[in-house]
Image (tube, rainbow, N blue to C red):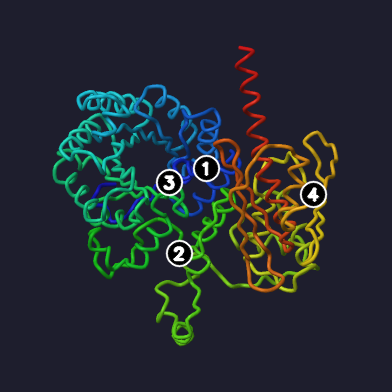
Amino acid sequence: MSNNSERIIIFDTTLRDGEQCPGATLNIEEKLAIAKQLSRLGVDIIEAGFAFASPGDFEAVNQIARTVGTENGPVICSLARARRDDIKAAAEAIAPAAKGRIHTFIATSDIHLQYKLRKTRQEVLATTEEMVAYAKTFTDDIEFSPEDAGRSDPEFLYQVLEKAIAAGATTVNIPDTVGYTTPSEFGAIIKGIKDNVPNIDQAIISVHGHNDLGLAVANFLEAVKNGARQLECTINGIGERAGNAALEELVMALYVRKQYFNPFLGCAADSEKPLTNIDTKQIYKTSRLVSNLTGLLVQPNKAIVGTNAFAHESGIHQDGVLKNKRTYEIMDAQSIGLTDNLIVLGKHSGRNAFRTRLQELGYEITETELNKAFLRFKDVADKKKEISDWDLEAIVNDEIQQAPDLFRLELVQVSSGSNAKPTATVTLYTPDGEELTDAAIGTGPVDAVYKAINRVVNVPNKLIEFSVQSVTAGIDAIGEVTIRLKHEDKIFSGRSANTDIIVASAQAYVNALNRLYAYLLKEQKQEQVTVSS
């Protein structure tokens, strides 16, 4: 594929850059679940991680390469600094994939050269040439990034890119690492590269950008108009600091404004040929999965996937939409997989009907996960007359999320009122199977529950975020609780859904504490290995 291609390549870095968002740390099972969904979504390339960063990162990239990197699946990529050890680890991690890519990078801005790398421009040019050539000995698919390209001297940038392509890079990625550029500036950078790098026709131009000024998506669309053909993005725009360019916003901009963008890709304005390979009907479900597993809530007014994205409160808007949706909606909610369907299932429904509906919604779950979700469904069906697809998704996601099963909540009971002191009693099973019960008084029922749980678990932590969202409308709606805990400099998230918001709050807190406890156990084991060696 060339820079004159009629299609945009979607490079998803949710599992690499997205996971660098504080509190978004995922275990291997969670990464695999997201990778499988990204494959169903139709992304062209999955950047599965930074293999050299840790044994856990290496294993995750390797498992994704083995499981998702099939002949008909996406390219599986690993990030690597322009160092031999990094590149070798990346090559070994992606080896099981039918199509593997090594993505290596080195900074090119003067501020990075002076303060971070402490290298001269000539040293960076030499390293670029040597390390891209080394990566090429492992795979033909090499991506090279000049870090902080947005603040690099253009003439030096052209030299670096020319060297990288000559050494074997098939994709050159232009990162706006700190989200500094504006759309016109970023477009000009891409145009400058096309006009001034002699061998640019031998590589695809890619872009990567952060949202520090809220301009990442606008920058990318301007880059497309100037010749970029690969977009590096994340689900829900998660990532370092203010996040990355959001995949769903980019894809739907190209989908809704196809006639506008067609000419920039060499197509007739009225061409109906899709500009990406993305199955847009998988967007909403992918967004929900990433939000659930990372514990990072999607803000209600978030473009495309926010709960208010297709909501109308203004009387004038409501009147117009009732007469014709196109008066105030530029896209159909169903185009991203959002429906208002009610499943025709109740407490007397069987497992087969339940399984069939999950398959219709696109869920591929194991027999064990199905059994767990079915029991929760029966429990909810006893409490609710109608269960929406949103309710069903909340039930399934809550049951199959991969939080470590260390402490297990057995009982939560609260007493509160206008003239009473909120009191909570909790019973938990410890990782050793011991049953412990304790009680506490708090400023409210949830505070009392958390204090009681802390007394049992006895792991120092600070609650930094508590969020509650209703999955559907109505007094019997399922409530989703997301919490984030801080321990030293690490953040751990937990999430749960239940018709009882107090129970959901307790379960979410235990989920987060389990992640924290698992981290502490891992650190303890590593210390023991270090001491013994």
Q: In what element is the residue under mark 2?
A: loop
- Give the labeled residue for mark 4: 440
First in residue order: circle 1 vs circle 4: 1
Residue 304, labelled with which disc?
2
First in residue order: circle 2 vs circle 3: 3
Q: Amino acid at mark 1?
A: Val
Residue 68, labelled with which disc?
1
Q: In what element is the residue under mark 1?
A: loop
- State whether residue 41 is above or below residue 31: below
Disc 4 to disc 2, how far (Cα)? 42 Å
As drawn, is 383 to the left or to the right of 96? right
Q: Amino acid at mark 3?
A: Arg
Q: Position of residue 138 (x, y in %)?
A: 38, 27
Q: Is disc 1 surrounded by few (<14), some (14 to 19) or many (20+) residues within 10 Å?
A: many
- Give the labeled residue for mark 3: 241
Depth check: give the residue in front, 186 or 74. Answer: 186
Which residue: 37% across, 57% down?
276
Q: Amino acid at mark 2?
A: Ile
Disc 4 to disc 3, how far (Cα)? 37 Å
